[in-house]
Amino acid sequence: MSDIRVGVIGVGIMGAGHARYITDSVDGAVVTAFFDLDAARMDALAKELSAKSGATINLHSSVDALVNDPTVDAVIICSPDGLHPEHLELCVKAKKPTLCEKPLAPRLEDAKKIAEIVKASGVPVALGFMRRFDPGYVQMKKEIQSGKYGEVIQIRAVSRNVSSPGATTAGMISNSAVHEFDIARWLLEEEFTTVSVAYAKKTSHANPDIQDAISILAHTESGVLMTVDNCANSTYGYDVRVEVLMQNGSLALNNLGDLTISFDFDLPARKSGRLHDNWIGRFTDAYIGELRAWVASIKDGVVNPNLATVDDGIAASIACEKGIASL
């Protein structure tokens, strides 16, 4: 089968990242179209990638034009969160398989509406919960399911961005902690029942309208407690880590992606080094793995079970909505 021709909606940090990953690291796919409001940014990226792939990249002045471009077989949506439902609806109406960055929508009501449209269309749609393809999280899930360490008791997560000038308190949940809700659901294979938010002392690096930092406390159906310490403006480096406390041990996925297991009084060494500037550097392998799985599912017609669905998006949005309601 020939290469899947991919159009990208939005070529900011995330869209440009996807386009570069496809060009450099994903066999069986080629980027052929862009839409972005910043014409200069779009043109520069098109020239960069065309020089590598040899493919012509069409530059469009509207999302509608991109999704109906006959040289586009599939679409990646990397537009602002609030535009995801509108753009996703255009993609499925055009019968284009789509990878939509998370969240499905910032508001649960909108997420449910677009999920119904997607399911009724029959068009394959995946959501960008890339941590499911991160080697550390994949290994962690295998260790949890091995039975060696007993049941999961508690999850303690840290999620800290270097700087987020436009962040809101609600957005820290729906745009950032949504990853923690999804990956915990994926690790445990159960849903969250309660979510609440506690405020920490406010950092002077945050804008006046945001409560930064926060801690999220959530319980799952079996009683597992997850806490997420979330900071939008930590300044010291991109810091994402998680510890899963089990009956007989601790699984810790550290800042740089290494998994250390404390068991039978053994405390292993942890990787040290320089923290990343943002999520792109930390999760490069995860994004590439996700894109490879997505392209393979389109070519083969067999969906990779680790690709997040719109139902996964709804479940994560339900948990986020519970947290936002407690603000």
Image (cartoon, helix red, strand yellow):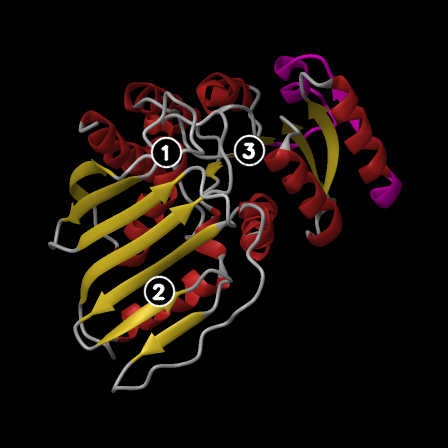
> In the rendered view, would you say 168 is above or below 24?
above
| Residue drawn at 42 percent across, 37 percent down | 232
The 10 Å Cα crowd at callout 1, few under 14, some 14 to 19, many 20 or more, is many
| Count of numbered labels shown in the rendering | 3
- Secondary structure at badge 3 equals loop
The residue that label 1 is drawn on is 172
Q: Amino acid at mark 2?
A: Lys
> Is 216 left, or right, of 267 in this rendering?
left
Whether 86 is drawn above or below 100: the answer is above
Q: Is residue 147 left or right of residue 32?
A: left
- Whether the residues at callouts 3 and 2 have beta carbons within 8 Å, the answer is no
Could you tell me how far apart the alpha carbons at marks 3 and 1 are, in whole angstroms? Answer: 29 Å
Label 2 crowd (10 A; few <14 / some 14-19 / many >=20): some
Q: Along the line of sight, which residue is nearer the eye, 311 or 323?
A: 323
Name the residue nearer the viewer: 1 or 248. Answer: 248
Q: In which quarter of the view is residue 199 placed?
A: top left
The quarter holding residue 169 reads top left
Q: Which residue is mark 3?
A: 97
Q: What's the residue type where badge 3 is placed?
A: Pro
Tell me which label, 3 or 2, sits earlier in the chain.
Answer: 3
Which residues lie in the magenta part?
Answer: 51-75
| Residue ID for mark 2 | 141
